[in-house]
Image (cartoon, rainbow, N blue to C red):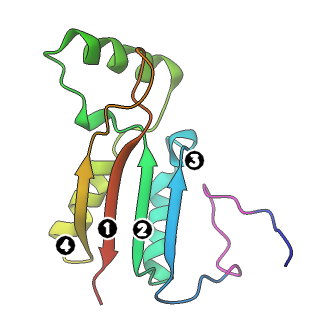
Amino acid sequence: VAGTMFDMSHPSYNFKIAPLSCVLTCGSIEQIPRDFQNFINYLLDMRVELCCHIEPCFELYDENNLTDMTAILFHDERGYVKGLLPYLEHLERDGKIKIICKRRTFIGAQQMEGYSVIVWTYLK
């Protein structure tokens, strides 16, 4: 088994993921705030059966909650990804995926919650 470089911002379609595979991201999509759609579209093109994202999810914060508002400000300051959940919800409305789970885990630091969970499946 050998490793290889993989750019999630601009995925190489030469790198194949076997159909019906499961993909797990953990704190990686947060690092590509402007190009995450490229990676999600790549996963769709590879027909990934199940995808689980463990990432900070800006859209699950409650801006009426003081602690969450602090997290929102921190999230903005650090430049973490925004729009992942709305993009996945858009794909669901288009009938491309089914979101199985989207929830906060309430695990993290006072400044941010880095472990929200979004799970989706590819619709054939």
Query: Whole-percent x and y of residue 77?
Result: 48, 16
Instruction: Give the Cα distance between marks 4 and 3.
Output: 25 Å
| Mark 2 → mark 1, Cα distance in angstroms | 5 Å
Q: Is residue 89 left or right of residue 45?
A: left
Q: Is residue 17 magenta?
A: no
Are there few (<14), some (14-19), or many (20+) residues within 10 Å of tag 2?
A: many
In the rendered structure, the answer to whether residue 84 lies left or right of residue 37 reads left
Q: Residue at x 68, y 72 (%)?
A: 12
> If the image is split into quadrants, where does the N terminus sit?
bottom right
Which label belongs to residue 88?
none
Magenta run includes residue 7: yes
Q: Amino acid at mark 4?
A: Asp
Q: Residue at x 32, y 33 (%)?
A: 58
Nearest to N terminus: mark 1 or mark 4? 4
Segment colored magenta: 6-15
Disc 4: which residue: 94
Q: CA distance from mark 1 to mark 4?
A: 14 Å
Label 1, on which residue? 120
Label 1 is placed on what type of residue?
Trp
What residue sits right under mark 3 in the picture?
Answer: 28
Residue 97 position within the rendered picture, expressed as x and y whole percent measured from the top left: 27, 74
Label located before the other in sequence (2 or 1): 2
